[in-house]
Image (cartoon, helix red, strand yellow):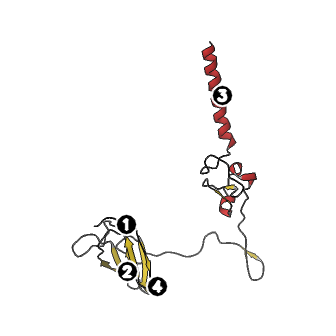
Amino acid sequence: MVFVRKIGLLLAASILAVSWTADAGIACKYNNGLSCPEQTPCCSPHGHCGNSVLACGTGCDPTASFNDACERYVIPKAVGPDGKSRPTPALPKGSFKVVGHTGVAAQHIALVTPTKMLIIDKAENNPAKLPNGKAAYSVEYDTVTNEYRVLDVLTNTFCSGGGYLANGTLISAGGAEGK
């Protein structure tokens, strides 16, 4: 009988501990199980402590934040030249139109002349093909004609990087294993 009573007490204590932990809500997800400190007082919707509008605004968890630091962020109204407020459009006006296909996916893009783009992908089975029938990993895309010219690269450019040097030279370096 004593054994059953001890099991019952342990079970009751476990249930209380679990329900208290769930209700307390004091831990910000990525803060080692702690609430946010004074320096970064807001527990963002993503579970990180911070002090910006993004952390302290909509979705901020007040129970895991320092001194209930969450504030409702109000989007400022647009004001016209006459000083009167104007409604902010729900969505910006504009549209997209497909004008051509690049032949390769764009891992890197560089505008190399006013009308030509260099597009580099990693080793993939892209629609653009080299003269030998293998998939191309890079193309030069013409923004006027919306056509591409395949380029042969010597290595798999996955995980590569690139940029322009001071003299205007474009470099691409690094990458994964060879083709």
Outermost residue toward the left?
A: 132
Q: Is residue 26 above or below residue 58?
A: above
Front of the two marks 2 and 4: 4
Outermost residue toward the right?
A: 83
At a point 68% along the width and 45% down the height, the residue shown is 26
Q: CA distance from mark 3 to mark 4?
A: 68 Å
Q: Is residue 12 above or below residue 90?
A: above
The label number, if any, that marks residue 141 in the structure image? 2
Q: What is the x, y in percent for residue 93?
A: 58, 75
Q: What residue did someone put label 1 on?
A: 158
Q: Nearer the viewer, residue 98 or 110?
A: 110
Q: Is residue 100 visible?
A: no
Q: Secondary structure under badge 3?
A: helix
The label number, if any, that marks residue 13 in the structure image? 3
Q: Secondary structure under badge 4?
A: loop
**Labels 4 and 1: the sequence-earlier one:** 1
**Labels 2 and 4: the sequence-earlier one:** 2
Local packing at callout 4 (Cα closer than 10 Å; few below 14, some 14-19, many 20+) is few
Q: What is the x, y in percent for residue 150?
A: 30, 78
Front of the two marks 1 and 2: 1
Q: Nearer the viewer, residue 42 or 172?
A: 172
The label number, if any, that marks residue 166 in the structure image? 4
Amino acid at dot 3: Ala
At a point 23% along the width and 76% down the height, the residue shown is 131
**Labels 1 and 3: the sequence-earlier one:** 3
Q: Quadrant of residue 125?
A: bottom left
Amino acid at dot 2: Tyr
**Labels 1 and 2: the sequence-earlier one:** 2
